[in-house]
Amino acid sequence: MSEIIPQLIVIALIISSVYALIAAGLTLTFGVLEFVHFGYGEMAMLGAYLFYTAHISLGLGYIESGLISIVGVTILGIIIEKFTFRPVRDRQVFIPLVLSIGIAIILQSIVLIIYGGTTKNLYVAGDVATKFTFFNDTITITSIQIFIILTAITALCGLCIFLKYSKTGKAIRAVSDDKEVAAIMGINVDRTISILFAIGSALAALAGILIGLDRNLTPNMGMLLTVYAFAVIVLGGVGKLKGAIIGAIIIGFIETFSLGLTSLKASSKELVIFGTLMLLLIFKPYGIFGGKKDEIESR
Amino acid sequence: MDYALYILIIICLYSIITLTGNILLGYLGILYLAIPAIYGIGAYTFAILATNGSNTFLAIFLGGIFAMIGGLLLSIPALKLKSHYIGIATLAFLFIISSLTYNLKDLTRGSLGIPGIPRPTIFGLYLESNLSFFIFTLIVTIIICTILYKILHSPFAKVIEAIREDEIAVKTLGKNTKIYKLQAFMISTFFSGIAGALFASYLGFINPQNFHIPQLTTAISMIIVGGMASFWGSILGTVILVLVPEILRFLTLSPDILAGVRLGIYGLILILFMLFKPNGLMGKRTNIFSK
């Protein structure tokens, strides 16, 4: 049993890095818009399917396909924000919430119409990944997995630096703290939220591609991803990038180890993750590090 | 004829599901996204009991009871949380139930589903024809809708709606709001479970895919179109949204495209209603999902 632990840690880290990426985008949008964007996971799904079209159907390389997918989803994200969320931003809370459910459904239906309900995967026939082994064969890692983890970490670091030091990043944080005060200080709130949606959509698309490289694509993966991402955010505490990363590592490890070390089947994965989420929501709704109660309740 | 009966039976059963969903979504005003999970519990309870030779009436009743137990479990996180957190908790509940129906193979046969679910027998009369089943469903629907109408026009519903608008104000009037919310959960999930049991009985075959996101979007769209916290709105919404996608049936599309178009119609309806008529056709302005 103990000899598979190093391998499990590697797998858990790969999954965690992808979860962190998707949760980072959701936690940013949640921080600013103050509602769960249920269509967020669907953006990731769309990213994965666009990548599939470019890479498998059109035969383009990884980088071109990735760019097409990310740019496409980003443009779509900006359009969605401009024409659906912006008009209802200051209305009652349920309106944007149900709206985002509607967007999720439409995106899912588009994918279902174009690609059908069958499972797709991103490997071209004969496209075998190089395997690397370490420490007397206790750890095997493929080149694709190395690519996944490096891309995710690079993107997250880039996001952190952007939010912390760039002018737009500071504007995003200001709007996330208080829209009205930010507007008084001369920040263009509409433009900032547009940029935020662009960044969120790009992150979602990237996460979707990475998940697609690791697993299969199905039209209903988006809704699951939204709830996974939310589980991650709740775990780490809402609205903070650091929380998303820590939450992702915890969920990744719980998922990998509960399935790797016990006799649970892979199909029980959802049961493990959502069971954990449920217990968390019951006993620690403000994240495992406590978090301030008012901070969340004022949302 | 069978086609018309199919439409009528679906309208009857979905009316119950929409109404019970509206109790929690509209009247109580919480983001309740576990609708298919709850009636799925009713359907699976009925299917498992009835295929093992239990009395069908008892099985229908137990379908309601088990759905209510599921609802009580769900109410533990749902009553503790606020706003979107309830949405996520109920959605997680939906995925948990779905995962259980896939994985408890000894009980539910997993993705194979349960075939050969019998229809009810009344006084030795087996309701084999669709007409007799429709009459039976209609009677049950009218009874349940009458009960719900009485409940939703009673002082109880006024308290529930007051809790939605301002819970603290209701508390200062000396009402135990938690008990009221719990009762709303029990009423909603019990009748929802009965509708689920009848669904299983009518279809004769169920699998986990009958109780997932597409069914959730259908139910939510019906509630939104009809209007939040509106009894007749729920029924109107159900009738409209059962009939509109039926037009697609006359186009010859492949099953995947048909499912996609159907889903897309519901999504489009949700978006358009939220942008232009957020309170639905017959709903009133409410303060929902805000707490």
Image: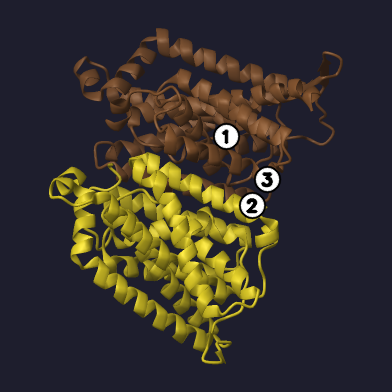
Chain colours: A brown, B yellow
Placement of the N terminus of chain A among the 4 image quadrants: top right
Q: Quadrant of residue A257?
A: top right
| Residue A47: assigned label | 1
In the displayed structure, A183 sits above or below B52; it is above
Indicate which disc, 1 or 2, sits on the residue closer to the N terminus.
1
Q: Is residue A131 left or right of residue A253?
A: right
Placement of the C terminus of chain A among the 4 image quadrants: top left
Q: Are marks 1 and 3 on the same chain?
A: yes
- Mark 3–mark 2 Cα distance, whole angstroms, equals 19 Å
Chain letter belonging to callout 3? A
Foreground disc of the pair 3, 2: 3
Q: Nearer the viewer, residue B210 or A197?
A: B210
Tell me how many marks there are. Answer: 3
Indicate which disc, 1 or 3, sits on the residue closer to the N terminus.
1
Q: Identify which amino acid the numbered label 3 is placed on.
A: Ser
Indicate which disc, 3 or 2, sits on the residue closer to the N terminus.
2
- Which residue lies at the image location 35% right of the left edge and 19% below the top edge? A172
Residue B214 image position (x, y, % from top left): 51, 56
In the displayed structure, A15 sits above or below B291; it is above
Per the image, the residue denoted by label 3 is: A267
| Residue A117: assigned label | 2
Residue B254 image position (x, y, % from top left): 63, 62
Q: Are marks 1 and 2 on the same chain?
A: yes
- Mark 1–mark 3 Cα distance, whole angstroms, equals 24 Å
